[in-house]
Image (cartoon, rainbow, N blue to C red):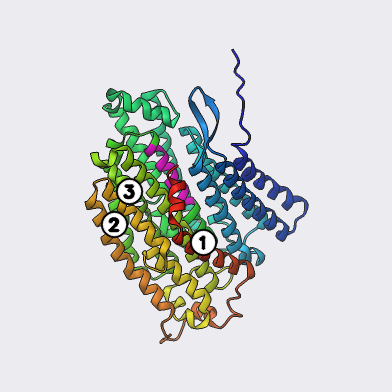
Amino acid sequence: MNVVQSVDSVALLPAYLAAGTAVLVLITDLLVARPRATIAVAALGAFGTAVGAVLVGAAGERRTFCVGADCSWIFGGRAALVGAVVALLTLGVLGLSGPALRAGRSPVGEYCFLLACSMTGGVVLGAAGDLITLIVALETLTLPLYVLVGLRRGSLASAEAALTFFVVSVVATTVTLLGAALLYAVTGGLHLDRLGALLAERSELRDLPLTTAAVALLLVGLAFKVAAVPFHAWAPATYDGAPLPVAAYLSTASKLGGLIALLAVVQRALPAEQTGPVLALLAVLTMTVGNLVALRQRRTVRLLAWSSVAQAGYILAPLGALALAAGRTDEARAAAYAAAVAYAVFFVVLELAAFAGVTALRPAGADGGTLDDLRGAARRHPWRAAALGLALVGLAGLPPGLAGLFAKVTVVRALLDGGAAWLALVVALNAVIGLAYYLWVTAALWAPVTTTPGPAAASAGDGAAAVPLVGVVAVVLAVATVAAVVLGLAPQLVLDLAGR
């Protein structure tokens, strides 16, 4: 019996490029010991990974590490989309990190290496075909972030945020692994497609209490990763304590990874009649609590964190249609899955633009400050404030932020197609609530300053010299803004890729 498998290295090329970037960063930091060279290697590696993912995905679906019809690595259109987006987000976060790294606030080699390792996990996650690969990839994406959150020297808030993130993530991982182990005990399988087929064909397995416990544990563990209510308490404190670029990565690439992992098990492995009601409840709680608490926030990053919680609810909403029989038809399910992925892509682009705008308006290495620090920013830095305003308006789902508008329309349409009109109404009501704080912050950027600014605000408002717009930060801000506009003009392209 031949136990040697052939390996499709072309299918694995994006993972090779991402992992190779991490190795090259270490070697460059060791041998060259020049921060600019290390950052350049990391940036080129991230860009090369994005290009590799696009090229491999364009050639059609490729599978490897297969046992019969079951494969652990499936690289198709959606995997290419996820890999390219994660790599480009990593590239953007590297650009936002430039001023702080040059100021010596974090060790350059370790920072770039950890970011490249996290990128590797995100690339692998999109192509995972079994629970082991999925969980290992998700942890590879998450583990480096524990260190990155606490890597800011001399910051107690950063250390506290890292500890909070670590404890919660360990609990979430433990719960996820327990759910996967119970599911294996019930079915004897680990490949996602095989699990889905077994549970669909054998109703006696679905009715077992052990199966119900396994499904619940898997959903709860992954809900922690996406900061869905009531498993969200770690997110605001972690985002606020982390350096701004790391908070941007947590809110974009890390959240995208958690959502892709949750979508993979829901779409391919778990029975829809069990997951649908849970996801509907999570979506309603997440978007409602996130929006209501965001209304009371006065710190910029905390507001963006609670906004990110609410946005996760919108992304989960199409999956809530699985709770109804009309939402479990093949056509309705495909529309729901595509809507969830497309909304996630639209969201992370707008969120990166928002964090880039805040970074550009704050002193190098500073935290996000308060909303009062941003008051009247457009009078001092009109173009930076305009880009931030466009991102916020897009997140609210208003023109000219067409990406956010089409994202919400896509979700509502998927819910209506799945017969979940009540959930579409909840989405619409929460979108109206979200308008309040998004538009309030946007208006504050152009509002006159009527009070004497505090030290933080004064340092941010003393002119261009106080907040130097480093070239690479300007590029990230401009590219993220242009990408948001382009995606808003061509939303069907993202929907087509998400539906593959």
Q: CA distance from mark 2 to mark 1?
A: 25 Å
Q: Which residue is mark 2?
A: 427
For the residue marked with disc 3, what is the amino acid?
Pro
Helix, strand or loop at label 1? It is helix
Q: CA distance from mark 3 to mark 1?
A: 24 Å
In the rendered structure, the answer to whether residue 470 lies left or right of residue 494 reads right
Residue 485 screen position, x and y as percent: 48, 64
Q: Is residue 452 above or below residue 350?
A: below
Instruction: Say the numbered circle drawn on residue 318.
Output: 3
The magenta stretch is 254-267
In the rendered structure, the answer to whether residue 75 lies left or right of residue 219 reads right
For the residue marked with disc 2, what is the amino acid?
Val
Which numbered mark, 2 or 1, is in the foreground of this view?
1
Return the residue nearer the eye: 353 or 325.
Answer: 325
Quadrant of residue 295 within the rendered picture: bottom left
Badge 2 vs badge 3, beta-carbon distance below 8 Å: no
Residue 209 screen position, x and y as percent: 27, 28
Residue at 42%, 61% (x, y): give it. 403
For the residue marked with disc 1, what is the amino acid?
Ala
Residue at 42%, 48% (x, y): give it. 341
